[in-house]
Image: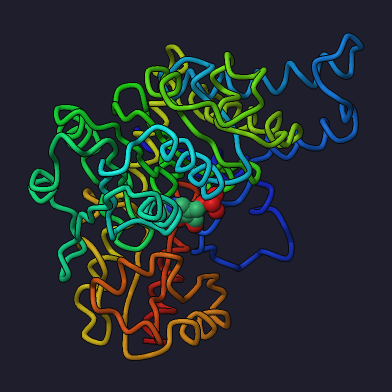
Amino acid sequence: MALDLDFVRAQFPAFNEAALQGQAFFENAGGSYTCAPVIERLMRYYTQRKVQPYGPYDASRLAGEEMDEARVRLAAIMGVDTDEVSFGPSTTQNTYVLAQAFAGFMQPGEAIVVTNQDHEANTGPWRRLAERGIEVREWKIDPDTGHLDPEALANLLDEKVRLVCFPHCSNVVGEINPVTEITAMAHAAGAFVCVDGVSYAPHGIPNVGELGPDIYLFSAYKTYGPHQGIMVMRRALGTTLPNQGHFFNEGTLYKRFTPAGPDHAQIAASAGMADYIDALAAHEGITGDGAARGAGVHDLMRAHEVELLQPLLDYASTKNSVRLIGPDQAASRAPTVALASQENAEVLAQRLVKHGVMAGGGDFYAVRALQAMGVNMDKGVLRVSFTHYTSKAEIDQLLNALDDIL
Ligand SMILES: Cc1ncc(COP(=O)(O)O)c(C=O)c1O
């Protein structure tokens, strides 16, 4: 079954926007286009329900119901309980709160494992625990390939390790890490697991319950939604870590790691992501419960992306003037492709503009990964990233443009 791209693109107002015609969007890893149901729900919330939620009057009751609906439906897609899903201002802010919680849970002399493949959001906050006497062990990538080898993790695990943090896939290396295998290794050693899913979730929201980590983080503004961080916190860990919210909220799992008042409208609008997944599932004849529909849509998205990605990887790996970061096989990676060259990547991105290609250059906050791979940080990398709504014609436009500027 192939993805019906006309249907898909009709769900994203950006594709009908006059100012964006002819512009091929390749900075999706920075933030995706927003799907229509999210925009409609956000608009409805701001115009019809912008009152304190969970009160007795209709506008307030509906506001609260829509916020709850977002957690109920996203939890179903991810195969976890509703109260295991919470929202925070961003993934980075969620991680800082989590690090604070672990600081209260761990004893000096205990250890955590972090990688140098991660975006800074899932490594910097954890590394700062060293200031509290926690030992920080770095799981290092292969400097040539960027690969994170599970065998190397085995050498870092012992009874002192309480937490292993790693990305589902890096926002520059792109390789999909075997979350279930790594989680099993960490659990066997008595450690919890925190996975940064920000770079993976845009390519199909995963069934987190089946994947197995204790914490799974992603950012809704990259999964067709509003600017929110979404956190799955499995119950066993969430009730063990010290509460970071108000004392009277400590019995409510989804409030324990979001100390600030949440953005009501954006949480309510996040149900639009589930609307989109369900609409796509219905259109493609995918049935079943939330998790089954989510899995079917995930697989369709992935198949389309893999097909479009391989020609780009083939091009990049044969082009002498660039170094492709990460694997050259589409099946093992996300369509987030970083290219290093002798030229400044921001200048290269600027040159793409005249070809109607929207992309970016720099370090993408993956400073440690690029440094470990020996990338010249003054030049950075050109990153081109796409999702399931990208067309073959846009890939061709990109390839022609790259051929001109590289
Ligand atoms: C892989 C990865 N992790 C984490 C983040 C941080 O997410 P947020 O902007 O929600 O803090 C990003 C943002 O680009 C990212 O790409």
In the picture, which quadrant includes the C terminus? bottom left
In the picture, which quadrant includes the N terminus? top left
Residue farthest along the top direction in this orientation:
56
User: Is residue 240 found left or right of 260 in the rendered image?
Assistant: left
Residue 130 visible from this viewpoint: yes
Q: Position of residue 333 (x, y in %)?
A: 27, 52
Q: Residue visible at 30% across and 74% down?
A: 371
Q: Position of residue 4 (x, y in %)?
A: 47, 39
Residue 390 visible from this viewpoint: no
Q: Position of residue 297 (x, y in %)?
A: 42, 30
Q: Residue visible at 35% across and 36% down?
A: 106
171 vs 143, nearest the viewer: 143
362 vs 277, nearest the viewer: 362
Q: Quadrant of residue 118?
A: bottom left
- Say if 241 sits above or below 18 in the image: above
- Say if 286 sits above or below 342 in the image: above
Residue farthest along the bottom direction in this orientation:
342
User: Is residue 135 found left or right of 221 in the rendered image?
Assistant: left
- Say if 182 sits above or below 397 in the image: above
What is the image's colouring? rainbow
Q: Residue visible at 47% across and 63% down?
A: 394
Q: Position of residue 50 (x, y in %)?
A: 88, 30
Q: Residue visible at 41% across and 69% down?
A: 383
Counting the numbered discs, the total is: 0
User: Is residue 115 found left or right of 96 in the rendered image?
Assistant: left
